[in-house]
Amino acid sequence: MFKKIVVGLDGSEASEKALRIACDLAQKYGAKMHIVHTPQVETLAVYMGAGGAVSVTPSQNELDAVGAQVIENGCAIAKECGQKVAKTHLIHGNPADQVLQCAEDCGADLIVTGRRGLGSISGLLQGSTSQRVSHLAKCAYLSVA
């Protein structure tokens, strides 16, 4: 049923739970998994222990370094679940747009994200990333609470 699964990972507990569910599905269907991360200020704040508030705009290098940690952690979770990640994608831009583009580029049949990640308060009820992906995905989409 699923041959390629794209997982949007932001380092939040919800996205890590989504990754674990994607691993389970990948194992069941023999699917290849792709992990996508788009470095954002919110991710840097959480990883640096700033509690969500960063007073200075971080450099792209700082964002990329934290992004690499998010990806590395995701690969470790996949390995712990007995899965191999086919490819990782550290892409700049809007997270929803990049997840959607990655899914289209690799021919994914399923996109999996956490319902609520590290984004701003504007996506309080349902994260703005998951909301946008759910509306624009051209394949199946699973939002994990």
Image: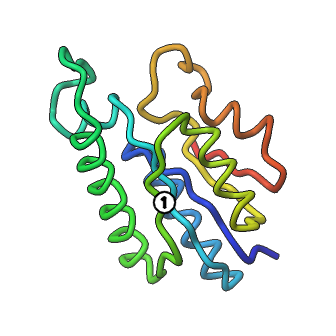
- Image quarter of the N terminus: bottom right
Residue 103 picture location, percent across and down: 69, 58
| Residue corresponding to mark 1 | 89
Number of numbered labels in the structure image? 1
Task: Residue type at mark 1: give it.
Answer: His
- Image quarter of the C terminus: top right
Residue 102 picture location, percent across and down: 64, 56
Q: Residue at x 24, y 43 (%)?
A: 61
Which of these two is toward me, 124 or 65?
Answer: 65
Q: Is residue 72 above or below residue 31?
A: above
| Element type where label 1 sits in the image | strand
Residue 79 picture location, percent across and down: 38, 78
Q: State left or right for residue 18 relative to residue 29.
A: left
Q: State left or right for residue 66 relative to residue 83.
A: left
Which of these two is toward me, 4 or 124?
Answer: 4
Which of these two is toward me, 25 or 137?
Answer: 137
Q: Residue 42 is drawn in which quadrant? A: top left
Q: Residue at x 29, y 38 (%)?
A: 60
Q: Is residue 70 above or below residue 132?
A: below
